[in-house]
Image: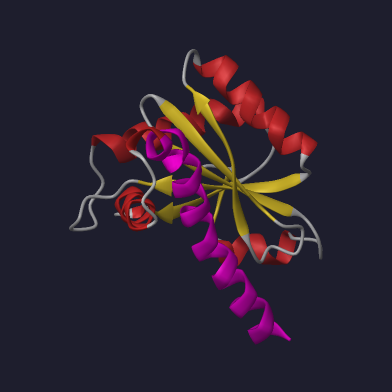
Amino acid sequence: MADNMLTLETLLPRLSRYGRLMGIDLGTKTIGLALSDVERRIATPLETIQRTKFTKDVARMVELATKHEVVAFVIGLPLNMDGSEGPRAQSTHAFIRNCAPLTPLPFIFQDERLSTAAVTRTLIEQDASRAKRAEIVDKMAAAYILQGPLDRLTYMARDQA
């Protein structure tokens, strides 16, 4: 595991009482971002970055992380349905390797299988138009990806108490 990669178990003892996590839904055309509250209980969609150049995209992500006092990133790992890693997962690993020189913040993987499908289904149920769905699905998927680790951190902290 790379130096900037942690598990939730190795992150928990490093966390101060307050500090936000940022969720990342890494796509080929966009990067959806979500933010936790300072107590790390609720994930909220933040922004969708239209991908242009790696350095510019990551600069925006790091700028937002700094502004919101983020202590770690939770990035969706697009596993195949059988749990294996395919080309998209390898692309995510490469993205993190390339981010390492640009931010000291650690990354945590979160299985993102079906996250976009779940969010899209919810938006359809809410009768959101196709244009509205396209506009917000990536940052909502990032919130969906982030919420799982937030819930786990809450349980882990209770177990330690």
User: Would residue 138 be found to the left or right of residue 73 on screen?
Assistant: left
Magenta-colored segment: predominant secondary structure? helix
Q: Position of residue 114 (x, y in %)?
A: 29, 54
Quadrant containing the C terminus in the rendered view: bottom right
Answer with left or right where residue 91 lies relative to residue 145: left
Quarter of the figure with residue 151: bottom right
- Residue furthest to the right in view is 17
Q: Is residue 34 left or right of residue 137?
A: right
Identify whether 56 is placed above or below 106.
above
Measured along the vertical axis of the image, is residue 87 above or below residue 55?
Answer: below
Q: Residue sitting at 79 percent across and 35 percent down? A: 67
* Residue range of the region highlighted in magenta in the rendering: 132-161
Q: Left or right? Give the position of 109 relative to 107.
A: left
Residue 125 inside the magenta-drawn segment: no
- Quadrant for residue 57, please give it: top right
- Give residue 156's position: percent from left, percent from top: 61, 77
Q: Is residue 113 visible in the rendered structure shown here?
A: no
* Residue 135 on the magenta segment: yes
x and y percent of residue 111 in the render?
Answer: 38, 56
Give the camera-side residue of 42 and 23: 42
